[in-house]
């Protein structure tokens, strides 16, 4: 019984109105899913002369003749699920069918299965090709036979793992965080339908492997591993085996997980009555090595590196040194950062060496929250590329950004504050309480009267917050005794670095501002940026390639209208900021359109000068009104002044 049939039967069996929450609980899914399904069910009800009644706050019922209700039940029993799938659901179902069948599928056959026209199936195939193109797969029509998926077996498995078991716009973390949904039709049935295997049995085998390995996988890695092992079983049953090079197999022979991988393969053979090849067993070993782990009792501060990591140690130290230079921080003595990166990068490099990928559901949030850190890391992952011949994808760059963000927080010294008040103890304590509640980076050194200001100098305090003006060399903020919101905002600008004191050379030149340029594509825009810089001898001939290399790492769109492409330091001869506004929006990453390009062209020596720029850009990137106003400007001086006030603030 499918979910739509379950919902209809449940409503029909109720004698009165029934709420969405009650339906969701009864069929083990979410209220949102029920509401979405009801939207798809409604046209089917109309076809059967039935009406769905929705009364806010009361519930739902289906009204009509008993004979029509019976006809509806018969409809669900005789018609296949496919007849009322949404287009996105149908496309994923077709994709699953293409993977499941070891033969070409005729378009006419698919049309009959899904109750749609030939032209609809043809359109679906175009959408499927968009879905799988990043895996270097393609659906092609073979004359006289039908459509098939073409590509490497390893690529097919990656696509299967990422696309087939999940609902559209839901990723692995959705199921990780919703145990109820994970055990319901939404995931389990899709897993069962697409792979025709018992999820629980595979899960038990992975749990046995964890026990033997002596460590636990993270929840995300465990589900990933279950899916990949299930795919290996199913593809083996279909006669599709993975291929690994002899050099790789030789290297894997010496891994400590080797014996457990072969024991796991033997267990799979026993449970699923299949014979995994030796190559498939090595593939399982790869997944063991690449999975993120949770090490019980591990203290990263006291973690001792094994003897096989000296190359990685040196590389990570160089990596930290490069990133800290751009961030204007000193992090190379942070043992916790160093050891955390070792723990993170060893399995990461294993994954990337063997072509295994890991989803990062927090990617967009991380990139938005830590733009300068993300950019600095993206600029320096070439170290790992050069050493290990791997490409560090955007998802992994975002994971690394979290480690550096944590290190930055650890290394930010609290601001030492002296609170001075002329109104007595009660008022001063109220001020202190408000400050502590609003800011976690303040250290209240003392609360005293204005008469004692001479007792404190720059070596003892960083900031004075006072209800009256005082004479001191230390920066002082004068506030109202009740600390109203406008005073809180003033304090926030100082203690949270909204206005950054900088000896920055960063500035906006009219020569680098290009207004209302008529460009039609990302390629045209990048060529335009490069040609302009080359003509002024600001970059080398390698700059355009470095722009495209950065685009390949991940999205450079930071809001609904701004892109921030940038090239490698090594290709820059002189620093500047390029600004381009466009006549018409241009597609950049996927469906994201941009109206403005901000290109920070920086040498390595000048990198720290642009920290204020990126900090303020992160603060203001969602201010749609501001950017619409800037994008509409026709005067370079006006744009330079407005943008300078927003992005290049100094206190």
Image (spheres, rainbow, N blue to C red):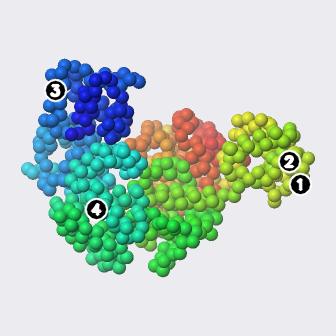
Label 1 vs label 3: CA separation? 89 Å
As drawn, the residue found furthest toward the right would be 451
Q: What secondary structure is found at the residue carrying circle 1?
A: helix
Q: Quadrant of residue 70?
A: top left
Label 1 vs label 4: CA separation? 69 Å
Which dot, 1 or 4, sits closer to the camera?
4
Q: Please give the residue where the numbered disc 4 appears in the rendered image.
A: 229
Res. 29 visible in picture? yes
Q: Earlier in the sequence, mark 1 or mark 2?
A: 2
Location of the N terminus (image quadrant): top left
On screen, residue 326 above or below 254 = above
Q: Residue at x 58, y 42 (%)?
A: 620
As drawn, the residue found furthest toward the left would be 144
Residue 70 disc label: 3
- Local packing at callout 1 (Cα closer than 10 Å; few below 14, some 14-19, many 20+) is few
Q: Are marks 1 and 2 in contact (CB under 8 Å)?
A: yes
Q: Residue at x 84, y 52 (%)?
A: 473
- Local packing at callout 3 (Cα closer than 10 Å; few below 14, some 14-19, many 20+) is few
Q: Residue at x 12, y 54 (%)?
A: 103
- Local packing at callout 4 (Cα closer than 10 Å; few below 14, some 14-19, many 20+) is many
Label 3 vs label 4: CA separation? 43 Å
Horizontal side of residue 582 vs 431, given as left or right: left
Q: Earlier in the sequence, mark 1 or mark 4?
A: 4
On screen, residue 313 above or below 463 = below
Q: Please give the residue where the numbered disc 1 appears in the rendered image.
A: 455
Q: Position of residue 357 (x, y in %)?
A: 37, 60
Q: What secondary structure is found at the residue carrying circle 2?
A: strand
């Amino acid at each position: 019984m499918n979910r739509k049939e379950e919902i209809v039967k449940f409503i029909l069996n109720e004698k009165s109105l029934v709420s969405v929450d009650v339906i969701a609980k009864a069929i083990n899914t979410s209220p949102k899913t029920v509401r979405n399904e009801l939207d798809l069910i409604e046209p089917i009800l109309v076809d059967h002369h039935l009406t769905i009644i929705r009364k806010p706050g009361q519930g739902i019922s289906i009204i009509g003749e008993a004979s029509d209700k019976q006809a509806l039940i018969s409809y669900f029993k005789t018609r296949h699920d496919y007849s009322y799938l949404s287009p996105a659901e149908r496309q994923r179902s077709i994709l699953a069918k293409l993977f499941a069948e070891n033969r070409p599928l005729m378009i006419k056959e698919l049309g009959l299965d899904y109750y749609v026209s030939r032209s609809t199936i043809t359109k679906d195939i175009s959408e499927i090709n968009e879905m799988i193109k990043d895996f270097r797969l393609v659906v092609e029509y073979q004359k006289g036979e039908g459509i098939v998926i073409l590509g490497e077996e390893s690529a097919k498995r990656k696509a299967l793992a990422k696309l087939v078991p999940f609902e559209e716009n839901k990723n692995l973390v959705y199921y990780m965080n919703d145990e109820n949904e994970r055990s319901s039709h939404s995931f389990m049935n899709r897993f069962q339908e697409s792979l025709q295997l018992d999820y629980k049995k595979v899960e038990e085998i992975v749990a046995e492997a964890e026990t033997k390995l002596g460590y636990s996988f993270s929840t995300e890695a465990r589900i990933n591993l279950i899916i990949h092992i299930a795919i290996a079983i199913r593809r083996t049953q279909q006669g599709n085996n993975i291929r690994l090079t002899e050099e790789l197999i030789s290297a894997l022979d010496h891994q400590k997980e080797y014996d457990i991988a072969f024991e796991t393969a033997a267990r799979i053979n026993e449970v699923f009555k299949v014979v995994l090849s030796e190559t498939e067993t090595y593939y399982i070993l790869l997944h063991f090595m690449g999975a993120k782990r949770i090490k019980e009792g591990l203290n990263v501060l006291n973690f001792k590196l094994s003897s096989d990591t000296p190359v990685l140690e040196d590389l990570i130290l160089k990596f930290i040194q490069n990133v800290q230079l751009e961030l204007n921080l000193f992090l190379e003595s942070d043992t916790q950062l160093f050891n955390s990166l070792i723990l993170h990068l060893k399995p990461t490099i294993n994954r990337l060496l063997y072509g295994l990928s890991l989803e990062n559901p927090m990617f967009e949030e991380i990139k938005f929250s830590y733009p300068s850190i993300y950019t600095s890391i993206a600029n320096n992952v070439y170290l790992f590329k050069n050493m290990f011949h791997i490409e560090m994808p955007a998802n992994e760059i975002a994971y690394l950004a979290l480690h550096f963000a944590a290190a930055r927080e650890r290394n930010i010294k609290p601001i030492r504050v002296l609170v001075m008040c002329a109104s007595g103890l009660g008022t001063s304590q109220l001020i202190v309480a408000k400050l502590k509640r609003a800011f976690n980076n303040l250290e209240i050194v003392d609360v005293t009267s204005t008469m004692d200001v001479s007792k404190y100098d720059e070596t003892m305090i960083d900031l004075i917050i006072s209800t009256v003006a005082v004479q001191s060399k230390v920066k002082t903020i004068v506030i109202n005794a009740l600390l109203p919101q406008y005073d809180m905002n003033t304090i926030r600008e100082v203690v949270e670095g909204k206005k950054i004191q900088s000896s920055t050379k960063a500035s906006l030149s009219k020569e680098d501002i290009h207004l209302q340029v008529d460009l039609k594509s990302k390629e045209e825009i990048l060529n335009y940026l490069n040609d302009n810089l080359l003509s002024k001898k600001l970059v080398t001939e390698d700059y355009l390639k470095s722009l495209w290399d950065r685009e390949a790492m991940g999205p450079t769109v930071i809001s609904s209208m701004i892109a921030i492409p940038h090239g490698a330091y090594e290709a820059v001869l002189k620093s500047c900021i390029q600004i381009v506004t466009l006549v018409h929006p241009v597609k950049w990453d996927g469906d994201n359109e941009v109206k403005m390009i901000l290109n920070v062209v920086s040498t390595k020596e000048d990198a720290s000068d642009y920290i204020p720029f990126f900090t303020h850009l992160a603060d203001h990137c969602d201010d749609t009104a501001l950017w619409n106003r800037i994008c509409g400007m026709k005067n370079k001086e006006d744009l330079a002044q407005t943008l300078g006030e927003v992005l290049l603030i100094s206190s």
